[in-house]
Amino acid sequence: MVIFYYRELGQVGEHVISVAICDDEETMVSLEKEKLLSISDDSELKIKTFTNGEVLLKKVQQEDFDIICLDIEMPNLNGMELAKRIRELGRESLLIFITNYENKVFQSLYYAPFRFIRKQYLEEELEEAYLSAKEQILQSRMVYTFEDKKIMRNISIKDILYLEVKGHWIFINTAEKQYKIRETMKEMEEQFGQYNFLRPHVSFLVNPEWVYLVGDKELLLENKISIPLSRSKKEEVKQQLAEYMGRRYQ
């Protein structure tokens, strides 16, 4: 039996998303908070607000946020420096930069922001950013549950590199371990298709999040694993990957 469900600290099924908002202007903090609450269920969001980057940084050391909205231009510790310090702590929060200065967009890319929002377009751009971030966050919490040697196993979808069929067995490969289950590739493609897994070859399903390079005859994953790429599948896979990356980083 195979099950997909959300994994959350606390009860399975809880979809709470934690957000930190930091801007030295209290009016902007209020506007951002009100906008987020207007497009979400009250029980869905846990928002904490800050008007000082140093105070936020101390909180980040104690607590992990799913999303952090940062003003770039702040006194003492500005948004760029704050983002750098957050990344140095190993936090993988989705960073949303909010600023009046569009020329800062290229500098911000160094910190892998999820979105760059212009304050004058806050109303429309914050809504799109939050809904996209929510989708990505909830998908990252999805867990694949299966039976392995009479033991129920849980694997995060995001941790699965690829699946390979050999005979009547499916091998599920993560960076740490390989699992073997009795399923057909057709069944697995139907189940994992909703998570954008690619089918570069009749024997493989690949998590697009791990694809580093599309070669002439192979997909190269980030950990240097090579997956065969059929000639007949090459253009289809490139298109699917481009669409996935477009949704992921638009």
Image (spheres, rainbow, N blue to C red):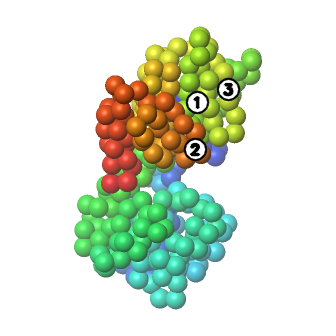
Which residue in the rendered view is the most extreme toward the top?
Answer: 168
Q: Please give left or right for residue 209 compared with residue 117 in the image.
A: right
| C-beta proximity under 8 Å, tags 2 and 3 | no
Crowding at dot 1, Cα within 10 Å, few <14 / some 14-19 / many 20+, comes out as many
Identified by mark 1, the residue type is: Tyr
Residue 172 picture location, percent across and down: 61, 28
Which residue in the rendered view is the most extreme toward the bottom?
Answer: 76
Q: As rendered, which of 181 and 14 lies closer to the eye?
A: 181
Residue 73 picture location, percent across and down: 41, 83
Lower sequence index among marks 2 and 3:
3
Q: CA distance from mark 3 to mark 1?
A: 12 Å
**Eye-nearest disc, 2 or 1:** 2
| C-beta proximity under 8 Å, tags 2 and 1 | no
Crowding at dot 2, Cα within 10 Å, few <14 / some 14-19 / many 20+, comes out as few
Q: CA distance from mark 2 to mark 1?
A: 24 Å
Residue 7 occupies which quadrant of the picture? top right
In the rendered structure, find residue 224 and report the number of the disc placed on it: 2
Identified by mark 3, the residue type is: Tyr
In the rendered structure, find residue 33 and report the number of the disc placed on it: none
Query: Relative to 57, is 44 above or below?
Result: above
Residue 144 occupies which quadrant of the picture? top right
Residue 64 occupies which quadrant of the picture? bottom right
Q: CA distance from mark 2 to mark 3?
A: 20 Å
For image coordinates 45% across by 25% down, the residue present is 201
| C-beta proximity under 8 Å, tags 3 and 1 | no
For image coordinates 45% across by 20% down, the residue present is 202
**Eye-nearest disc, 3 or 1:** 3
User: Mark 3 highlights which residue?
Assistant: 179
Q: Residue 129, can we see it?
A: yes
Q: As rendered, which of 20 and 230 lies closer to the eye?
A: 230
User: Mark 1 highlights which residue?
Assistant: 144
